[in-house]
């Protein structure tokens, strides 16, 4: 058999990538002058929007969907007011872009009319305020020192309206006079400052007007609320009611530009005919730039070499424009238009022309907000190309980049760029994903993998120069990468239906779409409040945010769990929309809040369990309950429409709407509890949670009272027991055996127990868990049944399967163990699996990608109080190679490596790629005791008892270990390896060190050889499979694979197998050349 | 079949206690002539090399070279059962499974105790540091070296050793201050165990992590004397001889200032 050996042809994995040569030349700048014309030939078919119908606005009305809103200031003159106008950018049904300039709208605010203020004082007040504003303007010295008297008189307008402060119930009908001050935003701002100091309103000396109302609300939100326009909603301008601007008069690049007084606008509800979406154009782009070695590209030095663009119409399946602007020659790419540019200047200018020509409504891409767009704009500045920054729809205004900090409870604090591309929405997919999904990694690659099950070839920055400097084929490869990077964001948007969902959210809440991405949660509820208040003449007071620690209040309640593994069905009763329905049922609102109780309890007012008083419905219906009722009703409608709708696209729209409504309903409660918010009202949020707590307790008592043994015509075999309850659900053990029985009693219980609550509070029976593993508060797992025969899914809450702060191995092992426990109900095989994994871990057989933990680098090292693993590692990686080191905002992947005793964890973190390349041993013990042991012990404890952890950590399976020898580390350079017997591991004497085995093992030589050969063949196969997988993913069969995607499991496997394979082939070498000699005995 | 008997369990106890914080899993190599162990610490900065020659044992039998993998933590647990004066017999029978038996016998009381410890299957490479000529070899009382390291570690993480013909200087410099210990080669050689001897071919100046030195000096109990072998840019050897029939050596890589793995 020895003759069968492959004669010395040991498997040679791919040679390590060639490093970029040190002498970095700027040879890509002017190399193509001989090969390319100075102006590229461009095929522009399909770029332009459809032609405009000539009759539009004259004999036909103009209907358009509003996407972007901005305001601008128009100085007053002798004949007109100083005013703030609003520009609405939108798209018509036939796909024409339009800019609607709305005139005669005046921003305004209110204050309560001082005692004795009457109609006769309006004139005095107006001129007093106007004069003070004018004085302030002159002081500001904004070049308008000479203000004509007429203009001064018209700076602001004052009138009397009747209304009421939103806060507190003061009696059924207590509208009082308010003074409404309207004018341009600038004038109002000045007026506000002056009013604080007191103004001579009634000609009797300065009057302090106290609290202002609605003066601190975003002007765009105010405009939309007051005109009833909603973000992404439809408006119509009747024929002949607007002025159409000729091309020379236009301020924008839109196909149509009109001015229309606010009173001529017709606003449509987003229903029926107007529920649809206009043919919105989305441009997805990606740039490639060339970096110097070890440095991340900087706009000041490093040129852009490619820009890929895809343009798609919302609702269509595929993009209708695909092109890539390339610096230098480039071989054609099938299906895409390659535009070869002679230098970077031409590239950028032609690209900007392209953007203006296709005129997209939405610009998307991956991280374009913080990288691609700022880079292009910075580059334009460096090369002095002012035209390139004109990407928006305003003729006179270029785009500028600013830093914008956003801080919200949902997102934490972060600093983004804010780019103003007038009239177009920047819809960065990264921002969307960051907002809406919790993932381990946010690279485009892993996000695509997560949602599309598709990956791309992830090319390191430092190989881009090689590709660019190569020939037209290598640049073609680069163009393919670039096009793919522009294509994936579009696919993601389609798959996640983000655009539709955001449009629907904008329609439901009324704010423009880009507010949803750039602002926090509160603005949405504020916009809804404002709309409702307008109808009922309530005014929103300005509340100084007291950004102190704020008084906390008690949250939801948890019924102490009776832990264990329940092998019988556990029924779950849920409160449907708990917090909204409490607010509706008990009429909790700003407008019903009482300072002190008046009248008869439970008739005129109620006392909430937290001790606050609210007026009852009979006194006044609250605003919040009305809003919530509307939202819930609208959601029901949307769900119904969704069911009845045949058109797939419209169904998606309805689904997006019902989701938006659900989220909005639930965030109303949070809005009242936000102490730094615009309208905090802790009395409401406290009462809501107090009701919630009380109701959970009542449910428990009621269920256990009714469903005693023998209840329900003897269908209850035992006393019902509530084993756990949290916030809005209770888990009940009825003692029945089958899921069907549990469902029957559960349905009955939901109906019966609901009776004790005020409608619309309702208990619903939705699901049965069987079996059910209750580990602790907020930690449980179970098999989820909504139908009696088959389970829907396995449901895990609070377990490591769904958390991100540990390595994927934990989630994986836990997932499999739970599956075995719950679905197969085989405890032994679950335990065996856990043990086998632990054993593999100690033998270094676990794939490194499963051990990677990732954390987001939110601020640099010195800003953290305690040293943190990922921060320290990022600093170390920066020392090693600044170009590939993680930057602020990246998620840093790391693994724990072995180190001396008492070395703190933050020093043990290491870059997984570095670990693989240098064969650094992993701290398997840390993974076992700190990561795996506790979560596994938790799920096995209900089964194995308290010894679970000991069995797992110290059992038989932990006794085989592999010690890895690192290539770095202080001693590595000095050690020599002595040969050991491949059979029994004993050290071979020096004279025999060439042999494969020791004398003792010689008889077993063939067996040992066979098993080693086997190992190598397996590795060869494995490597081959991984390599093919990578080729498939990169879609190249001839070229080498350039991918080094840091969050792709295959990349790590490939690297690891590559190392193991070279070791294995070295071992085979030791058996020497094949020979036919019979073994001597 | 492997069988070896030590007169005092105390010796093995001291050895295990002094290395168990550096090495967790130890593959012992047993041959006809000696029982030895070579293992790196987990951060690959230090190497432990132990050799117990046949002469140390009362009886010794080893039919063939074998490799016995033991967890030092478990070995330490087993040895805790023994009194220092008990004899200690190690026994491994190839055909009797995967355990090693420690037999402790108290000759005065005619008591024996058998402790079985499960072995581990440790897959590691066998590494060693080749012998070489060192520029400086210094011998001194083991207790003296231990105290010096301990004193300096209160000031610094790093130990600087300079040696010339005139003497050997240990320096620890830190933020709060510094400590310098100087030994001149002792002229009075009356008391051999107290003398400091120094052989210098070339002067040396090297830095080490003091944390590891303190780990090594746990072996002070094994021997009165310690020998330091030094050379620039080469690992130091800290050797504790064991009754002339063996040794416990520690190798420690020199500290390079930029090396962030070391402190």
Image: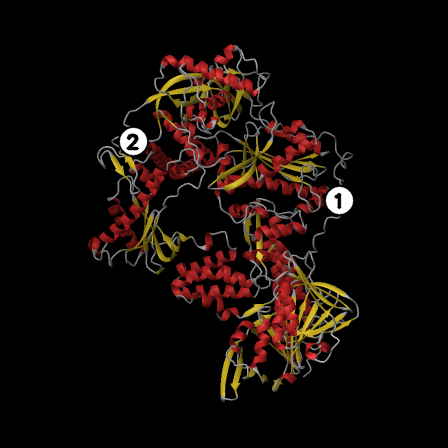
Left or right of residue A549, residue A26 in this image: right
Q: Is residue A680 above or below residue A735?
A: above
Left or right of residue A578, residue B151 in this image: right
Q: Which mark is residue A154?
A: none
Residue A412 seen in render: yes
Residue B90: image location, x then y, percent: 56, 82
* Mark whose residue sits in front, 1 or 2: 2
Q: What element carries label 2?
A: loop
Q: At 24% from the left edge and 59% from the top edge, which residue is drawn?
A: A717
Quick one: quadrant of the C terminus of chain A?
Answer: bottom right
Residue A907 occupies which quadrant of the picture?
bottom right
Q: Is mark 1 on a helix, strand or loop?
A: loop
Residue A277: image location, x then y, percent: 47, 30
Q: In this view, does A765 lie above or below A298?
A: below
Q: Distance between the residues labelled 1 and 2?
A: 74 Å
Residue A843: image location, x then y, percent: 56, 66
Left or right of residue A141, residue A174 in this image: left
Q: Mark 1 lies on which chain?
A: A
Q: Which of marks 1 and 2 is nearer the N terminus?
A: 1
Pointer 1 residue: A24
Q: Which chain carries label 2?
A: A
Q: Is residue A804 above or below residue B48?
A: above
Q: Are marks 1 and 2 on the same chain?
A: yes
Pointer 2 residue: A621
Furthest-right residue in view? B201
Instruction: Looking at the picture, tell me which residue is in the foreground, B186 or A804.
Output: B186
Instruction: Looking at the picture, tell me which residue is in the foreground, B222 or A815.
Output: B222
Colouring scheme applied when the structure was drawn? secondary structure
């Amino acid at each position: 058999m020895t003759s069968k050996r492959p004669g010395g042809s040991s498997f040679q994995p791919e040679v390590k990538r060639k490093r970029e040569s040190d002498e970095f030349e700027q040879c890509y700048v002017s190399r193509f002058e001989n090969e390319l014309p100075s102006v590229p030939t461009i095929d522009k078919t399909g770029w332009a929007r459809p032609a405009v119908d000539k009759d539009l606005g004259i004999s036909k009305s103009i209907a358009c969907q509003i996407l972007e809103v901005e305001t601008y200031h128009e100085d007053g003159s002798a004949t007109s007011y100083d005013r703030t106008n609003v520009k609405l950018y939108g798209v018509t049904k036939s796909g024409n872009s339009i800019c609607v300039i709305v005139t005669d709208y005046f921003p305004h605010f209110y204050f309560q009319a001082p005692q004795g203020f009457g109609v006769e004082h309006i004139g005095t007040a107006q001129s007093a305020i106007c004069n003070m504003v004018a004085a302030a303007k002159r002081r500001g010295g904004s070049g308008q020192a000479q203000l004509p008297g007429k203009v001064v008189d018209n700076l602001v307008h004052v009138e009397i309206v009747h209304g009421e402060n939103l806060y507190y119930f003061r009696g059924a009908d207590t509208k009082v006079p308010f003074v409404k001050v309207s004018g341009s935003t600038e004038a109002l701002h000045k007026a506000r400052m002056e009013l604080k100091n007191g103004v001579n309103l009634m000609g009797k000396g300065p009057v302090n007007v106290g609290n202002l109302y609605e003066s601190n609300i975003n002007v765009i939100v105010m405009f939309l609320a007051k005109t009833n326009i909603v973000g992404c909603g439809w408006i119509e301008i009747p024929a002949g009611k607007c002025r159409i601007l000729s091309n020379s008069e236009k301020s924008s690049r839109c196909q149509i530009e009109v001015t229309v007084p606010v009173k001529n606008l017709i606003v449509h509800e987003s229903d029926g005919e107007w529920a649809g979406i206009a043919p919105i154009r989305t441009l997805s782009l990606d740039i490639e730039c060339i970096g110097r070695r070890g440095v991340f590209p900087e706009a000041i030095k490093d040129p852009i070499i490619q820009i890929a663009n895809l343009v798609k119409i919302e609702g269509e399946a595929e993009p209708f424009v695909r092109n890539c602007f390339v610096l230098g020659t480039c071989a054609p790419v099938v299906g895409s238009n390659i535009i070869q540019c002679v230098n970077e200047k031409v590239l950028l200018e032609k690209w900007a022309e392209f953007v203006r020509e296709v005129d997209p409504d939405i610009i998307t891409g991956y991280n374009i907000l913080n990288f691609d767009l700022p880079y292009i704009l910075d580059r334009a500045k460096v090369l002095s190309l002012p035209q390139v920054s004109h990407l928006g729809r305003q003729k006179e205004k270029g785009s500028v980049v600013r830093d914008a900090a956003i801080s919200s409870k949902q997102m934490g604090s972060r600093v983004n760029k804010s780019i103003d591309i007038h009239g177009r929405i920047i819809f960065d997919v990264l921002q969307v994903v960051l907002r809406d999904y919790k993932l381990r990694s946010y690279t485009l690659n892993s996000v695509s993998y997560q949602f599309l099950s598709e990956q791309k070839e992830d090319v390191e920055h430092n190989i881009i120069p090689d590709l660019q400097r190569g020939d037209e084929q290598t640049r073609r490869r680069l163009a393919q990468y670039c096009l793919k990077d522009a294509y994936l964001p579009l696919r993601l948007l389609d798959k996640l239906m983000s655009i539709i969902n955001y449009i629907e959210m904008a329609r439901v809440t009324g704010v423009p779409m880009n507010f949803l991405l750039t602002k926090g949660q509160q603005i949405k509820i504020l916009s809804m409040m404002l709309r409702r208040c307008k109808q009922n003449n309530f005014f929103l007071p300005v509340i100084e945010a007291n950004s102190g620690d704020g008084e906390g209040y008690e949250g939801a309640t948890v019924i102490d769990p009776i832990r264990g593994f329940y092998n019988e069905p556990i029924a779950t009763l849920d409160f449907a929309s708990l917090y909204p329905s409490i607010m509706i049922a008990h009429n909790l609102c700003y407008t019903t809040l009482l300072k002190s109780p008046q009248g008869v309890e439970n008739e005129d007012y109620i006392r909430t369990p937290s001790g606050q008083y609210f007026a009852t419905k009979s006194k006044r219906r609250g605003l919040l309950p009305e809003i919530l009722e509307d939202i819930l009703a609208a959601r029901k409608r949307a769900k119904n429409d969704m069911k009845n709708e045949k058109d797939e696209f419209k169904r998606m729209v309805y689904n997006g709407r019902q989701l938006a409504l659900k989220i909005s309903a639930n965030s109303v409660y949070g809005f009242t509890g936000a102490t730094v918010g615009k309208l905090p009202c802790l009395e409401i949020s406290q009462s809501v949670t107090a009701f919630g707590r009380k109701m959970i307790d009542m449910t428990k008592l009621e269920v256990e009272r009714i469903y005693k043994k023998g209840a329900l015509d003897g269908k209850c075999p035992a006393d019902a027991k509530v084993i756990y309850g949290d916030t809005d659900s209770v888990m009940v053990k009825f003692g029945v055996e089958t899921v069907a029985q549990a469902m029957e009693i559960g349905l009955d219980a939901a109906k019966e127990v609901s009776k004790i609550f005020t409608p619309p509070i309702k208990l619903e029976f939705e699901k049965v868990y069987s079996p059910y593993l209750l580990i602790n508060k907020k930690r449980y797992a179970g098999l989820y049944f909504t139908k009696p025969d088959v389970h829907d899914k396995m449901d895990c809450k609070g377990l490591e399967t769904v958390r991100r702060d540990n390595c994927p191995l934990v989630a994986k092992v836990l997932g499999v163990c739970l599956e075995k426990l719950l679905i197969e109900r085989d405890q032994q095989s679950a335990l065996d699996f856990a043990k086998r994994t632990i054993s593999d871990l100690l033998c270094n057989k676990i794939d490194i990608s499963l051990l990677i933990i990732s954390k987001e680098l939110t601020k640099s090292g010195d800003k953290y109080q305690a040293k943190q693993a990922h921060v320290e590692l990022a600093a170390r990686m920066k020392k090693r190679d600044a170009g590939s080191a993680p930057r602020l905002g990246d998620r840093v992947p790391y693994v724990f490596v072995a180190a001396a005793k008492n070395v703190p964890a933050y020093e043990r973190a290491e870059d997984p790629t570095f670990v693989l390349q240098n064969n650094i041993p992993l701290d398997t013990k840390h993974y076992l005791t700190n990561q795996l042991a506790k979560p596994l012990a938790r799920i096995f404890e209900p089964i194995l008892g308290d010894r679970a952890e000991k069995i797992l950590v110290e059992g038989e399976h932990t006794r085989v270990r592999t010690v890895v020898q690192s290539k770095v580390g202080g001693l590595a350079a000095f050690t020599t390896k002595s040969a050991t017997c491949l059979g029994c591991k004993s050290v071979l004497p020096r004279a025999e060190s060439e042999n494969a085995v020791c004398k003792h093992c010689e008889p077993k030589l063939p067996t040992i050889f066979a098993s080693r050969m086997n190992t190598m063949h397996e590795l060869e196969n494995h490597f081959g499979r991984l390599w093919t997988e990578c080729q498939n993913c990169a879609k190249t069969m001839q070229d080498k694979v350039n991918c080094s995607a840091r969050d792709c499991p295959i990349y790590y496997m490939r690297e690891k197998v590559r190392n193991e394979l070279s070791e294995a082939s070295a071992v085979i070498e030791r058996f020497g050349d094949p020979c036919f000699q019979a073994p001597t005995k | 079949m492997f069988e070896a008997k030590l007169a005092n369990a105390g010796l093995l106890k001291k050895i295990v206690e002094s290395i168990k914080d550096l090495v967790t899993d130890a593959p012992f190599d047993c041959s006809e002539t000696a029982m030895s162990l070579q293992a790196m610490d987990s951060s690959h900065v230090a190497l432990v090399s132990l050799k117990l020659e046949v002469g140390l044992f009362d009886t010794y039998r080893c039919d063939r070279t074998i490799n016995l993998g033991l967890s030092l933590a478990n070995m330490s647990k087993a040895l805790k059962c023994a009194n220092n004066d008990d004899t200690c017999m190690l026994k491994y029978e190839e055909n009797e499974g995967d355990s090693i038996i420690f037999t402790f016998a108290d000759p005065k009381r005619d008591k024996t105790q058998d402790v079985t410890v499960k072995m581990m299957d440790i897959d590691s490479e066998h590494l060693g540091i080749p012998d070489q000529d060192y520029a400086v070899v210094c011998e001194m009382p083991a207790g003296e070296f231990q105290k010096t390291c301990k004193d300096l570690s209160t000031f610094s993480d790093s130990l600087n050793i300079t040696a010339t013909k005139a003497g050997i200087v240990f320096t620890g410099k830190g933020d709060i201050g510094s400590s310098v210990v100087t030994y001149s080669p002792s002229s009075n050689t009356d008391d051999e165990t107290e003398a400091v001897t120094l052989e210098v071919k070339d002067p040396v100046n090297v830095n080490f992590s003091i944390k590891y030195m303190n780990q090594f000096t746990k072996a002070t109990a094994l021997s009165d004397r310690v020998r330091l072998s030094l050379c620039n840019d080469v690992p130091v050897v800290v050797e504790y001889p064991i009754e002339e029939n063996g040794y416990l050596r520690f190798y420690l890589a020199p500290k390079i200032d930029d090396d962030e793995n070391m402190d």
